Structure formats: C-alpha cells, structure tokens
Amino acid sequence: MADTAAALSAPLSEFLASRIPRAAQKAHQRFPAVPVDDFEQAMWEKILRAPVKFTRLHEQEKYGAIWAELRREGTRLGQDDNRYRQATKALAEGYSVYDVEFYSTGVLAKILPALAEADFDVAEAMDRSSSSTDAAGIHIRSSDPFGGSENYLVILIDVAKAYSRLPEGMRRLLQTYYGVSQEDTEDGRWAREGLASSMGLTADALRQRVHRALQRLQDELGGPDPWQ
C-alpha cells in the first residue's frame, strides 16, 4: 500500500499504516471467510474516497473516530460477503435467503433467562413455559394450535446448542448474569449491580462483558442478519 499511503499526508499515512492492519485483523476475526488483505484494501479505498475528511480528523486528533470508520468499513465488507455467500447457497440449494433464521443479540438476551432458569435443559425450559410464564416472558398454551410451541422449541434448541460451544468462561458468565432478574425495575437493577459488585466489576463493565459474550453466541448461530 506504499502508493496509496503516498497519496496522503505523511503523518496520516504513518498513522493508517499502523492502524489499518490491526483493524483488518479484527474484522477478519469477525468474518473469517474474508481474507485480511481484502479488508485492508477496502479500508485504504475508503480513506482515499474522502482524504480531506480523514486528514481533518487526524489533525484534530480524533483517532477514535478514524478507528470507528475503519471498523464500519470492515463490517460493511464482511456483511456484503455474508450476503453473497447466503444468496449463492440459497440459489444452489433451491431455497430463499429469507427462509434462514438469524438471531439478534436483543433476541438472545430475551431467551437466555429462560434457559438459565432451566440450567440450559431445553426440555425443562419447555415444561416451565407450558406450565407458567417463564423467565423470558413466554407462556405456551398447549390447547392453542397457533401458540408457537414448535417455533419456541426450535429457538431454545438452537441457542442451547450454540451456548454449549462457547468457551467455559463465557458459559459461566451468561449463566450467572441471566440467572438474576433482568427486569427493568429497581429490584432488577439492584440484583444486577449486586452481581457486578460481587465480581469486582462496575455494572457497566459487566454489561460490556456480557455483550461480548452475546456477540460470540450470535457468531455461533451464524452471525448477525446480513440482510438488514
């Protein structure tokens, strides 16, 4: 990328020469099907499409903003690649890309309390949701043919299997965190803050760790929806 860097100011070129490989490597970790070199090229091209903007950001020492732009470009390329692979697979196997189920981290956060309550035993989680409202707020009525029991069972099975593939530390974290009340009430917030304190963390630090674990769980389930 020597020619690319030469088109920019020396300080910005030097800065990007150290940051882009790191950003590309992190993007590759999130989207391993895309080579690191492809991420690097896309990031340099993004910079060259708006050199004045990035020169100004660098002069103003807004390094975090530049890093955020590089990360967004990595996400864009990774999701474009995901869309292409999903579409190619759907065409080859004769189904629609819209038949594929993706799980957002928000959905996972709503499902995990029910599984944590049942120690990730899917059968027990289904029993709880059939007999009363479970920790995810779901109550399946067996007498209702449109009650959604089959869909809920599939979701629980998918999430439990993905959870079993996580590193042990992440499994413990998710089990512990979603084992306490997730309600947006004073008691719920007190329970979560108490858990964070018992782990020697601030409530915000604990939430960040949990979010990273949710993202890893999402990756095990196929990643975020590339069509959004």
Image (spheres, rainbow, N blue to C red):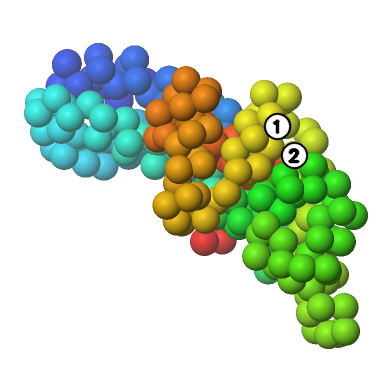
Is there any visible trace of residue 173 in the rendered image? yes
Q: Is residue 163 left or right of residue 144?
A: left
The earlier-in-sequence mark between 1 and 2 is: 2
Q: Are marks 1 and 2 in contact (CB under 8 Å)?
A: yes
Where does the image place residue 197, in percent across and percent down from the top left?
Answer: 46, 27
In the image, residue 51 sits, relative to residue 145, either above or below, namely above
Where does the image place residue 202, in percent across and percent down from the top left?
Answer: 40, 28
Q: Residue at x 60, y 38 (%)?
A: 177
Which quadrant, please, contains the N terminus?
Answer: top left
Q: Residue at x 42, y 52 (%)?
A: 186
Residue situated in front as seen by the camera: 159 or 66: 159
Residue projecting furthest to the front: 187
Q: Is residue 40 left or right of residue 13?
A: right
Q: Is residue 155 left or right of residue 202?
A: right
Is there any visible trace of residue 90 in the rendered image? no
Where does the image place residue 4, in percent across and percent down from the top left?
Answer: 30, 25
> Alpha-carbon distance for marks 1 and 2?
7 Å
Determine the secondary structure under disc 2: helix
Which quarter of the figure has residue 7? top left
In the image, residue 58 sits, relative to residue 148, either above or below, namely above
Residue situated in front as seen by the camera: 161 or 126: 126
Q: Residue at x 87, y 78 (%)?
A: 142
Where does the image place residue 200, in percent across and percent down from the top left?
Answer: 47, 20
Q: Residue at x 76, y 58 (%)?
A: 155
Residue 171: image tag: 1
Circle 1 packing at 10 Å, graded few (<14), some (14-19), many (20+), is: some
* Residue, disc 2: 163
Q: Amino acid at mark 1?
A: Arg
Which quarter of the figure has residue 163? top right
Q: Amino acid at mark 2?
A: Tyr
Determine the secondary structure under disc 1: helix
